[in-house]
Image (tube, grey):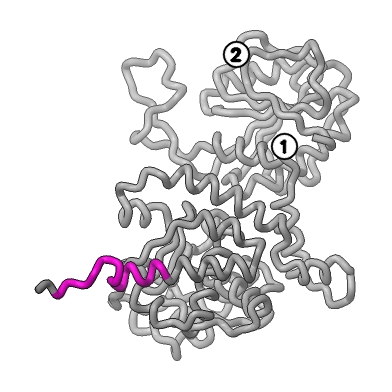
């Protein structure tokens, strides 16, 4: 007689079933997360030390660890991982230390769930009362200020030596060099795409699932994550803190009108990176004697062409402010701005922060041809945004780079370029 356990009774199967149940309960207790809970794909895998989630929506738990939790604790863990998706931990960490940013969001999420579920974080989870009123960036800065753990010698990797930060790092799963454990990256439950590719190499649904998860995450925030806290913040009472202001700003980001979301997606799609021979240049042209290096994604310069005719001055300031708010997430480190009326009146490169106070030159004519041709002569230009009301002249022949026409008003009948993508960015769009 075989003594092998039934497939339905293996620890992996039991843990996966328990996770599905925990997600259903989390969706009932926190309705704004129910859409995410339905989209999540679940797995039980020993390679994860405790629990983790990928940006594609795949949630993974360690079978033995998860089955050892009580039912309420399982709900807390499931809700915690859902909130990493809703708060976009994977995307927002940017250039920050991934593990420290993960720890910061763990603090914030656990404090949110303490208030929402009325229970303390289980399994020695990171606990910082009041963290929900702080930004992740502020928490990361605080942890770095307490102790710069990267600079310590190997023998200093102990909680007592690191003080408060050491306790946080140890509880977050960041032991010293040489310690081994699961294949899960230390201190990380917002797991990277490359980890998912290694663990689940035959999953061809990652990209499609990621897009749906991102859209549902925006919807979850729009439904009012922690409405009681935002209501208090909006009252303008003396109890409002900078952290509450940051939370309101984060929520507002997820409630942007459709054109702003489309603009952000365009920026992220066209973002180039530093040169690499692993990818040929798109501006190779007819050169057959040499291979020009292509680009990897990293910090880059955004190109803007501004229609500075008199009717555009007020609209330019508004759209520049919106673009500035997206530059960090898109990896933009500098902005090249060409101001045009009948000729190029200004061609300069400025920092992203300078957009907030950028001086726009008034003009009379409306011909963007000189500016677009100037960019065409620069082989480093891959994409450009043209901000205009559409009542302009422009080159009839396509330019050798990607163009986004950002129209600040209704499209004039005379405006019908044969290239580029048109996006309405007016106040009512």
Residue 284 drawn above or below residue 149 = above
Instruction: Please report contact status of discs 2 and 1: CB closer than 8 Å, yes or no.
Output: no
* Foreground tag (2 vs 1): 1
Q: Which residues are magenta?
A: 3-17
Magenta segment main secondary structure: helix
The kind of secondary structure element at disc 2 is loop
- Nearer to me, 65 or 195: 65
**Residue 48 % position (x, y):** 36, 68
Q: Quadrant of residue 258?
A: top right
Q: Is residue 73 visible?
A: yes
Within-10-Å neighbours for mark 2: few <14, some 14–19, many 20+: some
Residue behind mark 2: 398
**Residue 121 % position (x, y):** 55, 82
User: Left or right: 30 with respect to 84?
Assistant: right
Q: Residue at x 67, y 29 (%)?
A: 385
- Nearer to me, 285 or 415: 415
Residue 157 falls within the magenta-colored stretch: no
Q: Residue at x 84, y 34 (%)?
A: 315
Q: Residue furthest front?
A: 1
Residue 401 drawn above or below residue 331 = above
**Residue 105 % position (x, y):** 57, 69
Q: Is residue 188 visible?
A: no
Where, quadrant-wise, is the N terminus in this rendering? bottom left
Q: Residue furthest top?
A: 396
């Amino acid at each position: 007689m075989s003594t092998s356990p039934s497939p339905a009774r293996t620890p992996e199967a039991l843990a996966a079933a328990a996770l599905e149940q925990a997600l259903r309960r989390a969706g009932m207790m926190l309705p704004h997360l129910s859409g995410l809970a339905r989209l999540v794909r679940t797995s039980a895998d020993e390679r994860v030390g405790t629990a983790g989630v990928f940006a594609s929506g795949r949630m993974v738990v360690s079978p033995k660890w998860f089955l050892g939790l009580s039912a309420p604790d399982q709900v807390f863990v499931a809700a915690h991982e859902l909130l990493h998706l809703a708060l976009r931990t994977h995307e927002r960490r940017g250039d920050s230390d991934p593990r420290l940013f993960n720890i910061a969001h763990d603090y914030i999420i656990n404090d949110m769930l303490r208030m929402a579920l009325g229970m303390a974080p289980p399994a020695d989870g990171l606990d910082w009362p009041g963290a929900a009123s702080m930004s992740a960036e502020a928490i990361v800065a605080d942890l770095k200020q307490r102790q710069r753990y990267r600079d310590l010698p190997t023998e200093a990797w102990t909680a007592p030596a690191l003080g408060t930060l050491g306790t946080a790092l140890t509880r977050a799963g960041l032991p010293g060099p040489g310690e081994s454990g699961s294949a899960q990256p230390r201190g990380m439950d917002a797991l990277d795409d490359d980890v998912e590719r290694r663990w689940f190499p035959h999953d061809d649904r990652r990209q499609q699932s990621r897009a749906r998860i991102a859209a549902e995450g925006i919807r979850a925030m729009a439904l009012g994550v922690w409405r009681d806290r935002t209501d208090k913040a909006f009252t303008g009472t003396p109890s409002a803190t900078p952290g509450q202001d940051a939370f309101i700003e984060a929520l507002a980001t997820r409630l942007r009108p459709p054109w702003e979301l489309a603009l952000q997606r365009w920026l992220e799609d066209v973002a180039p990176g530093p040169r690499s021979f692993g990818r040929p240049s798109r501006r190779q042209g007819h050169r057959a004697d040499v291979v020009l290096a292509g680009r990897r994604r990293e910090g880059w310069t955004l190109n803007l062409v501004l229609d500075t005719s008199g009717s555009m001055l007020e609209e330019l300031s508004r759209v520049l402010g919106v673009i500035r708010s997206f530059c960090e997430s898109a990896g933009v480190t500098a902005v090249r701005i060409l101001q045009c009326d009948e000729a190029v009146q200004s061609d300069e490169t400025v920092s992203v922060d300078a957009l907030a106070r950028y001086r726009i030159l008034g003009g009379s004519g409306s011909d963007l041809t000189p500016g677009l041709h100037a960019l065409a002569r620069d082989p480093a230009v891959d994409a450009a945004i043209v901000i205009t009301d559409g009542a302009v002249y422009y080159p009839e022949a396509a330019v050798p780079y990607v163009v986004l026409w950002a129209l600040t008003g209704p499209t004039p009948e005379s405006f019908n370029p044969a290239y580029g993508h048109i996006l309405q960015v007016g106040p009512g769009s």
